[in-house]
Image: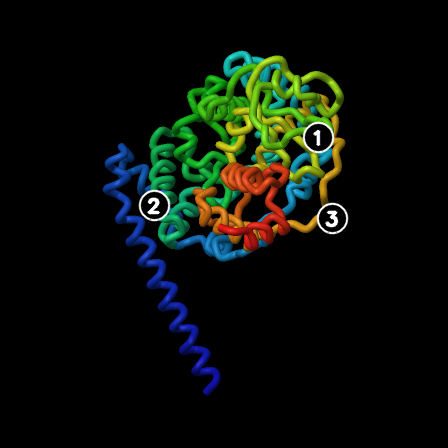
């Protein structure tokens, strides 16, 4: 009896799997008119999907996996700006000095910045990903996971194949469709990738010069301002008015702010104060070039890691100010509750996603200023409790 039940269950699972596979192939075929409208040939379409017969179960598993959100920024930086990565970045700077100088001359994006993004995205080209981009994007789109976005990215991937910059076997990257040494999504590739080595292909998969020049192209399109630092680590004088957190470097200098190493601030440019660990942690003055990093990845932690890694590759020192590692901090649920509370007071208009970022930071500052609290923009459990008990 048990054996027959198991056999029946196995048959049912096989039939279910076959039905799912048929549905997947039907969904793919439904893309053809959209691909054709973008100039993709039938030959390219068929070649792209020849080996894509079913969704990728590993990609589906990643969708469902729920890790803890809100890793402390100091833990993130410790991993992202490790001594080993800094050393590899310096080695690549020496190895590729001529190419980097040529890209910097053309783009005005400093070589250490290019190396830092390259290091963060693919560990200097060594970790590009092995997942089929076409299969990953088809799996994500057909599964209904932000389906419009990933369907459009899949169509963009077909355009890449039509242009012959890479073949289906080489179009690989991460489980979420980011590709090559730059980890560009296909639409970003079409918009920003560069053929720097002159071989007629925009090859972000195997050509380091193309990858580095493409990073420079992305940052310039994201608003990178030549001659302006991404930011600087600073020391604030005693009694500094945190409510006045925007201004020119000259204004901050006149108010007693100095670089963390004691030297003077840049002579020109606008900046804002960023306290990613609150008043008791490191302080930074960040510029619009910090936002260019966030165009690559919207995380504050990522943008700070890129900037600090660039500084370290250029010979800068580690951060000297301690982080508040023992202080209580909000988890994702707490951050979402804070967003909801600030939104109810018309101070926050961003997504209720439990993620810290510039919109939440600005809303926290506005609340702190109105409540007479030190306006460091840092979300803490104490701030959430204050909000909950304050009069509307």
The total of numbered circles placed on residues is: 3
Category of crowding for the residue at label 2, using alpha-carbon neighbours closer than 10 angstroms: few (below 14), some (14–19), many (at least 20) = few
Q: Secondary structure at mark 3?
A: loop
Query: Given contact means CB atoms under 8 Å apart, are the residues at marks 2 and 1 in contact?
Result: no
**Which residue was labeled with disc 1?**
239
Q: Secondary structure at mark 1?
A: loop
Q: Quadrant of the N terminus?
A: bottom left
Residue nearest the observer in this picture, 200 or 234: 234
Q: Position of residue 5 (x, y in %)?
A: 44, 82
Q: CA distance from mark 2 to mark 3?
A: 42 Å
Q: Position of residue 218 (x, y in %)?
A: 47, 26
Identify the image quadrant of residue 318.
top right
**Which residue was labeled with disc 3?**
326
Q: CA distance from mark 1 to mark 3?
A: 24 Å
What residue do we see at 65% from left, 37% from top? 80
**Relative height, residue 373 to residue 55 (above, below):** above
Q: Earlier in the sequence, mark 2 or mark 3?
A: 2
Q: Nearer the viewer, mark 2 or mark 3?
A: 3
**Can you tell which mark lies on residue 148?**
2
Q: Position of residue 344 (x, y in %)?
A: 45, 49
Q: Position of residue 138 (x, y in %)?
A: 38, 48
Q: Secondary structure at mark 2?
A: helix
What residue do we see at 47% from left, 23% from top? 223
Q: CA distance from mark 2 to mark 1?
A: 51 Å
Can residue 392 be seen here? yes
């Amino acid at each position: 009896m048990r054996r027959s039940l198991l056999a029946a269950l196995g048959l049912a699972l096989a039939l279910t799997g076959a039905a799912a596979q048929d549905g997947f192939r039907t969904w793919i075929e439904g893309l053809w008119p959209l691909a054709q409208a973008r100039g993709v040939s039938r030959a390219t379409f068929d070649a792209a999907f020849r080996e894509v017969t079913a969704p990728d179960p590993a990609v589906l598993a990643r969708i469902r996996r729920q890790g803890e959100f809100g890793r402390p920024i100091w833990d993130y930086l410790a991993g992202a700006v490790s001594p080993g990565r800094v050393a590899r970045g310096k080695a690549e700077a020496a190895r590729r000095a001529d190419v980097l100088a040529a890209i910097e001359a053309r783009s005005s994006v400093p070589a250490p910045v290019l190396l830092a993004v390259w290091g963060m995205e693919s560990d200097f080209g060594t970790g590009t990903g092995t997942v089929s981009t076409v299969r990953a994007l088809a799996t994500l789109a057909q599964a209904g996971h932000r389906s419009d976005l990933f369907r459009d990215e899949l169509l963009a991937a077909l355009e890449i194949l039509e242009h012959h910059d890479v073949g289906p076997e080489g179009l690989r990257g991460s489980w979420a469709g980011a590709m090559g040494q730059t980890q560009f999504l296909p639409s970003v590739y079409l918009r920003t990738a560069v053929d720097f080595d002159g071989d007629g292909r925009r090859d972000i998969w195997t050509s380091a010069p193309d990858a580095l020049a493409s990073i420079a192209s992305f940052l310039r399109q994201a608003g990178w301002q030549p001659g302006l630092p991404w930011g600087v680590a600073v020391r604030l004088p005693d009694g500094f008015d945190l409510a006045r957190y925007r201004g020119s470097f000259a204004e901050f200098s006149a108010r007693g702010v100095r670089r963390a190493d004691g030297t003077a601030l840049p002579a020109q440019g606008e900046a804002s104060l960023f306290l990613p660990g609150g008043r008791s942690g490191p302080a930074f003055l960040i510029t619009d070039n910090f936002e260019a990093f966030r165009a690559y990845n919207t995380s504050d932690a990522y943008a700070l890691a890129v900037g600090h890694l660039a500084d370290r590759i250029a010979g800068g020192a580690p951060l000297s100010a301690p982080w508040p590692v023992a202080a209580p901090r909000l988890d994702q649920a707490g951050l979402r509750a804070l967003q909801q509370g600030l939104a109810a007071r018309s101070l926050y208009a961003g997504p209720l996603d439990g993620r810290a970022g510039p919109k939440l930071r600005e809303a926290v500052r506005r609340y702190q200023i109105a409540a007479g609290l030190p306006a460091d923009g840092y979300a803490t459990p104490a701030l959430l409790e204050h909000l909950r008990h304050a009069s509307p």
